[in-house]
Image (tube, rainbow, N blue to C red):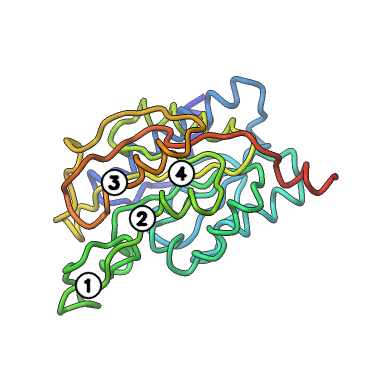
């Protein structure tokens, strides 16, 4: 199955990039989904613009190489056009929380049956490291030579406030655990959001190596616990704890079910 999901395209990520490990996790998750009865041709992926988007070239499934910040509406269009498709979007932290912010908020309201995977390395790495909405204060780049003045937003808190029905966070370097969470997200009936914490080898290296802060959890529909977990790390430092796993999971009507009514 892994061979069938691979392509002959040369992988052009930086040697040692954690995207290599995330690619393996995605293939494992897709393999499980296909083994469970989903046809390979009925899986569609959508990507934005950024280092994350190159994953489009390395997975042998249908898809759409989209525009920056427009991964979610493209996924939604595919899902509305053919509800039988299993749709997974891949986006970056800048891709999702800057240009794509409005789409992200409303995705929780719509609760369409699709998955969003956000690669978060806290910088616009493909375009030489400008700060994103999750970049820590003080980060110096060519775009912010005096240091990033703004406090980073917390996407997990935002997802909870927006009514997202499946929220999870993973460590890109933990292939097996990430594959397990991705499979659960794809099987979830509704909009699922998985944040991938990963390092960039070139830019914003001060925020790398947070593995020691991470611990695994599995929360279901307890909002109070989810809110507490969401507040344990503020994206602004390497202090506190970083829970990974399912942070919130609740069943509620999907968009297609609401439209039928």
Along the polypeptide, which appears first: circle 2 or circle 4?
A: 4
From the image, state whether disc 3 or disc 1 is nearer to you.
1
Whether pointer 3 and pointer 1 mark residues with C-beta atoms closer than 8 Å, the reply is no
Q: CA distance from mark 1 to mark 2?
A: 16 Å
Q: CA distance from mark 2 to mark 4?
A: 30 Å
Quarter of the figure with residue 190: top right
Disc 1 target residue: 148
The local crowd at label 2, few if under 14, some if 14 to 19, many if 20 or more residues have their Cα within 10 Å, is some
Residue depicted at 34% across the width and 40% down the height? 229
The local crowd at label 1, few if under 14, some if 14 to 19, many if 20 or more residues have their Cα within 10 Å, is some
- Residue 43 lies, with reference to residue 76, above or below; the image says above
Disc 2 target residue: 154
Give the number of the disc on residue 190.
none
Whether pointer 1 and pointer 2 mark residues with C-beta atoms closer than 8 Å, the reply is no
Is the C terminus in the top left, top right, bottom left or bottom right quadrant?
A: top right
Disc 3 target residue: 198
Q: Secondary structure at mark 4?
A: helix
Q: CA distance from mark 3 to mark 1?
A: 20 Å
Task: Report the label total.
Answer: 4
From the image, state whether disc 1 or disc 2 is nearer to you.
2
């Amino acid at each position: 199955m892994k061979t069938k999901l691979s392509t002959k395209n040369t992988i052009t990520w930086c040697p040692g990039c954690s995207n290599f490990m995330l690619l393996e996790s995605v293939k494992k998750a897709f393999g499980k989904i296909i083994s469970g009865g989903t046809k390979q041709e009925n899986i569609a992926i959508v990507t934005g613009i950024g280092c994350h988007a190159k994953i489009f070239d390395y997975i042998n499934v249908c898809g759409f190489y989209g525009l920056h910040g427009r991964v979610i509406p493209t996924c939604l269009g595919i899902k509305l056009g053919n509800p039988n498709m299993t749709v997974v979007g891949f986006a970056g932290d800048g891709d999702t929380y800057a240009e794509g912010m409005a789409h992200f908020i409303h995705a929780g309201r719509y609760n369409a049956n699709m998955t969003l995977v956000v690669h978060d390395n806290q910088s616009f790495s493909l375009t030489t490291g400008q700060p994103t909405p999750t970049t820590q204060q003080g980060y110096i780049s060519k775009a912010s030579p005096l240091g990033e003045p703004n406090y980073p937003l917390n996407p997990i808190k935002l997802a909870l406030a927006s009514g997202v029905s499946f929220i999870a966070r993973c460590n890109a370097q933990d292939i097996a655990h990430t594959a397990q969470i991705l499979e659960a997200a794809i099987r979830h009936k509704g909009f699922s959001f998985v944040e991938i914490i990963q390092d960039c080898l070139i830019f914003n290296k001060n925020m790398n190596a947070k593995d020691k802060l991470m611990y695994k959890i599995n929360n279901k529909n307890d909002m109070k616990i989810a809110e507490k977990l969401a507040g344990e790390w503020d994206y602004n430092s390497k202090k506190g704890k970083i829970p990974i796993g399912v942070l919130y999971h609740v069943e509620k009507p999907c968009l297609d079910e609401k439209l039928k009514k």
